Image (cartoon, grey):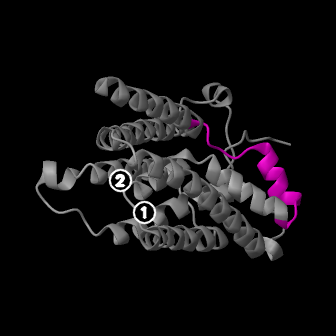
Amino acid sequence: MQATRVTRPARLLAGLLCLAALPALAHDVSPVARERMQNGGILDYIWTGAVHMLTGYDHLLFLFGVMFFLTRFMDILKFVTAFTLGHTITLVFATFAGITADHYLIDAVIAVTVMYKGFENLDGFRRWIGTAAPPLLAMVFSFGLIHGFGLSARLQDLTLGDESGLLGKILFFNLGVELGQIAALLVMGVVIRAWQQTTVWEPVTRVCNGLLVFFGFLLLLYQLHGYLHEQGHVHGPATTSEAAGVPHGHDGGPLHVH
């Protein structure tokens, strides 16, 4: 009977995380989001930020790992604030300054943060490396900076329109991100609290955090594959005009002779 009670939560969790990981592979900027950010108002910017967070399963998986063992409200507030400060700093300043990088590489690093949190929750540093884990609060803040850079890269993919209103759009988008994050944290808190009250908490702990490592690794492979595929297109075989020996101008296009 006990084996059945352990197996069912594990299967349910595996199914939920599989469903969560699949949309993460397609987490991108939609044409609707582009239209909202270009021509919409304040509520559109907030809505786009909230939707972006709630469909950003790499961010949610990391937050799930951070929340997993937190029971006291002050602890939850402390770690969530550290993460929020981190991603707000890079989201606002990187976007406003136009600092960006290849989003596949940024998301690959974010996938590593998911793996890290699952590994740390499994007490992996002590059990398999023989050392204490780095200070968690500092790591959560540092990873928040990385997640914010990922959010910034996606935001910069949007057509933000008039430069004079850029900062306002960024700030309202970030407000939406925070609201989406709060909604996700409330759901996570309820689910984790319910699990903690059951007799299967210990096996669920191992399953959940093992799956965080596993899905983080899958996301890492996916992002690296996307980056290599992208680079293959950039540095791929010659175009038809190049193969035909058509001379090219400085902009890379065919050289037209008038």
- Residue assigned mark 2: 117
Relative image position of residue 50 (x, y in whole percent)? 69, 56
Can you say which quadrant of the picture contains the C terminus?
top right
Residue in front for this viewpoint, 254 or 92: 92
Residue under the point 35% across and 66% down: 139
Distance Cα–Cα, label 2 vs label 1 = 10 Å
Q: Is residue 146 above or below residue 85?
A: above
| The stretch drawn in magenta includes residue 36 | yes
Q: Local crowd at mark 2 within 10 Å, few (<14), some, or many (≥20)?
A: many
Relative placement, left or right, of 52 versus 223 is right
Q: Which residues are magenta?
A: 25-42
Location of residue 149 by image quarter:
bottom right
Q: Is residue 47 magenta?
A: no
x 41%, y 62%: residue: 71
Residue 135: where, in percent of width, then height?
A: 28, 70
User: What number is the disc on residue 182?
Assistant: none
Mark 1: secondary structure:
helix
In percent of width and height, residue 60 lies at 53, 50
Q: Residues within 10 Å of mark 1 (few under 14, many from 20)?
A: many
Q: Amino acid at mark 1?
A: Phe
Callouts 2 and 1 close, C-beta under 8 Å: yes
Disc number at residue 143? 1
Work out whether mark 2 precedes mark 1 in sequence or the reverse, and give the earlier one. Answer: 2
Decide if residue 102 is in sight here. Answer: no
